[in-house]
Image (cartoon, rainbow, N blue to C red):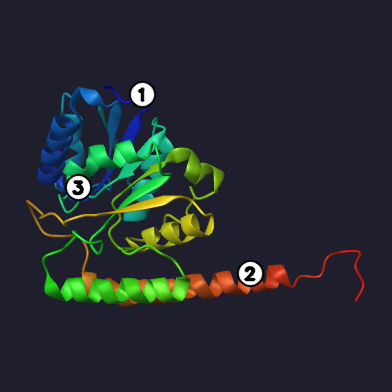
């Protein structure tokens, strides 16, 4: 049965020509004619010819978007959201770390939830590297403790969400979508604060098929930690000031 809501799948790229071409083919095979969807490939001016290769595809579902300034993962995703036509959004990496086999499940469950996100730390989820698993797990435990949130994987960034949820909660802006994967920490924080319904499901981390990753995990770990602390501190100061502000016309 055809899903009657259009889904915009946003695929941010930098030097992912071989991966994204195979990913597009895999998504088409998995979703087929049972879903109404578009694939927005947002390329950060890759020198490997990613944008040109995507433009040469004879696929009516694919919409390539070239960014030539202020490169960033989060900025690419935000531009993809802003140009999207679908009522539903999916954001995923283009290197097969995010397995496209989960797409039908994620899209279907937006019938019942506002947001669906993968977690490598739910029972049944996993990632291969032991060192990264341990560091990621510690980071996520600490993030939940500091923020009071319930998200078990604030680093994965594979999610589906209703677009109107982002719009009505004023989350489609550069204050959220900036930097690299740390944008996802901010997004999950504010979605939870807005009491948006979020389904987490166990996801097995996929394997990159071509090339090397664009991020140095251990290099950004401390930056992410600083961002969490800054986020929670800023929000606590704001909440305290808002709670204790003096209203006009009232006397002590």
State the SS at label 1. Answer: loop
The tag earlier along the polypeptide, 3 or 1, is 1
Residue at the spot x=16%, y=57% of the render? Answer: 205
User: Observer-nearest residue: 127 or 94?
Assistant: 127
State which quarter of the image contains the N terminus.
top left
Residue at the spot x=33%, y=33% of the render? Answer: 7
- Residue 9 seen from this side: no
Quadrant in the picture for residue 246: bottom right
User: Observer-nearest residue: 219 or 128?
Assistant: 128
In the depicted structure, whether residue 57 falls above or below residue 45: above
The residue pinned by badge 3 equals 94
Residue at the spot x=29%, y=42% of the render? Answer: 106
Give me the C-alpha separation between circle 3 and circle 1.
Answer: 26 Å
Circle 1 or circle 2, nearest the eye: 1
Q: Position of residue 210 (x, y in %)?
A: 7, 52
The tag earlier along the polypeptide, 1 or 2, is 1
Q: Position of residue 145 (x, y in %)?
A: 42, 76
Q: Position of residue 130 (x, y in %)?
A: 13, 73
Give me the C-alpha separation between circle 1 and circle 2.
Answer: 41 Å
Circle on res. 239: 2
Circle 2 or circle 3, nearest the eye: 2
Quadrant in the picture for residue 168: top right
The tag earlier along the polypeptide, 2 or 3, is 3
Category of crowding for the residue at label 1, using alpha-carbon neighbours closer than 10 angstroms: few (below 14), some (14–19), many (at least 20): few
Circle on res. 4: 1
Category of crowding for the residue at label 2, using alpha-carbon neighbours closer than 10 angstroms: few (below 14), some (14–19), many (at least 20): few
State the SS at label 2. Answer: helix
State which quarter of the image contains the C terminus.
bottom right
Q: Total of numbered circles in the picture?
A: 3
Quadrant in the picture for residue 5: top left
Residue at the spot x=50%, y=72% of the render? Answer: 232
State the SS at label 3. Answer: loop
């Amino acid at each position: 049965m055809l899903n009657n809501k259009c889904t915009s799948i946003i695929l941010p790229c930098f030097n992912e020509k071989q991966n994204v071409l195979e990913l597009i083919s895999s998504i088409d095979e998995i979703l087929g004619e049972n879903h109404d969807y578009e694939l927005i490939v947002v390329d950060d001016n890759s020198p490997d010819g990613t944008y040109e290769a995507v433009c040469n595809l004879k696929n009516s579902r694919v919409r390539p978007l070239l960014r030539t300034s202020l490169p960033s993962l989060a900025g690419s995703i935000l531009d993809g959201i802003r140009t999207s036509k679908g009522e539903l959004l999916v954001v995923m990496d283009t290197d097969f770390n995010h397995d496209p086999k989960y797409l039908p499940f994620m899209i279907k469950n937006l019938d019942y939830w506002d947001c669906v996100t993968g977690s490598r730390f739910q029972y049944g989820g996993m990632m291969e590297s032991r060192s990264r698993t341990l560091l990621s797990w510690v980071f996520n435990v600490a993030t939940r403790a500091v923020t009071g949130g319930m998200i078990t994987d604030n680093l994965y960034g594979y999610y589906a969400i209703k677009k109107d949820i982002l719009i009505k909660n004023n989350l489609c802006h550069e204050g959220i979508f900036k930097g690299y994967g740390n944008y996802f920490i901010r997004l999950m924080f504010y979605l939870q604060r807005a009491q948006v319904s979020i389904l987490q499901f166990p996801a097995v981390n996929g394997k990159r098929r071509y090339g090397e990753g664009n991020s140095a995990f251990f290099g950004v770990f401390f930056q992410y930690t600083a961002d969490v602390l800054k986020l929670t501190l800023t929000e606590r100061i704001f909440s305290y000031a808002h709670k204790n502000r003096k209203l006009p016309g009232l006397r002590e």
